[in-house]
Image (cartoon, coloured by chain):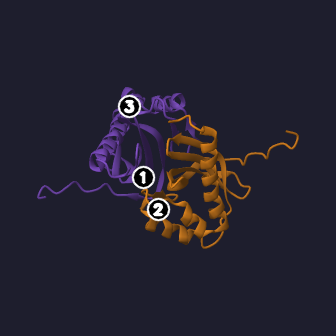
Chain colours: A orange, B purple
Amino acid sequence: MFGVKRADTEADVLEANASFYRAFSRADYASMSRLWAERAPVACFHPGAPLLVGRAQVLESWKQILRGPVPMRCDHAVVHLLGDVAFVTCYEGNGDRPAHLAATNAFVLEDDRWRMVHHHVGPLSSPIAKPAPPSKAN
Amino acid sequence: MFGVKRADTEADVLEANASFYRAFSRADYASMSRLWAERAPVACFHPGAPLLVGRAQVLESWKQILRGPVPMRCDHAVVHLLGDVAFVTCYEGNGDRPAHLAATNAFVLEDDRWRMVHHHVGPLSSPIAKPAPPSKAN
């Protein structure tokens, strides 16, 4: 269950996770809507807020949030694979500022595409600096 | 995938989630250790803290936390079923005080038992009152 095409699968999950942050940063509601699962149950904890349940409620919240672009960065993304379900943990930050939020993003394979089913984000007690870009010498 | 024995499955996941809060409240490290998955990847975001990854690191954190009992209550638990994976969302509170934390607890079926793979908890902006006990008239 945890070995088949693991590297490819992790890359696919990371790409789904990256597409979430691209949609967020570009205020691209259409892409955000396509990312969230159609059939699997979905839910969302925005920072400090009570639970949102169901595609309609979750997508309505994103429609409100994506009225303008938010330069949301995702650092240190780690994939945790559980067969046809995966969750990604990462830190979120704005622009070049240190990350100030911890996020869990859950995905499920739906029609051979990783689609989002849960987003939980909350504050970090100590911000975490943006990783240095890879050295050009390497 | 999402229909078979749904009610029984949800009850089993809720019981696994309840066992987490029992172990927490009783400072029962042995039960906490048995609850966390042995083979599936595990991770944990304690409030405000950076990610812990892997069973050893996660369990070591619980060993520290469970040095004394913490009367941790779980309100409004909702099961989100994804086949052999499930996540539970709930609010956490101490004793009779309003819940002050939002939690996501993820579980995976391992050897026919629901075992924990992820715990992410963060503060609520507005505490949520403890639900009233069910009326005896009903």
Question: Which residue does the numbered mark 1 point to in the structure image?
Answer: B100
**Kind of residue at badge 1:** His
State the CA–CA distance, disc 3 to disc 1: 34 Å
User: Does label 3 or label 1 sit earlier along the sequence?
Assistant: 1
Disc 2 marks which amino acid? Glu
What's the mark number on residue B111? 3
In percent of width and height, residue A127 lies at 65, 48
Q: Name the quadrant containing residue A72.
A: bottom right
Badge 3 vs badge 2, beta-carbon distance below 8 Å: no
Q: In this view, does A102 lie above or below B54?
A: below
- Both labels 3 and 2 in a single chain: no
Chain letter of the residue carrying label 1: B
Q: Which mark is residue A38?
A: 2
Mark pair 3, 2: CA separation: 30 Å
Packing grade of label 1 (10 A; few <14, some 14-19, many >=20) is some
**Whether marks 1 and 2 lie on the same chain:** no
Viewer-proximal residue, B114 or A111?
A: A111
Tell which tag, 3 or 1, sits nearer the viewer: 3
Residue B10 higher or lower than B42, as above or below: below
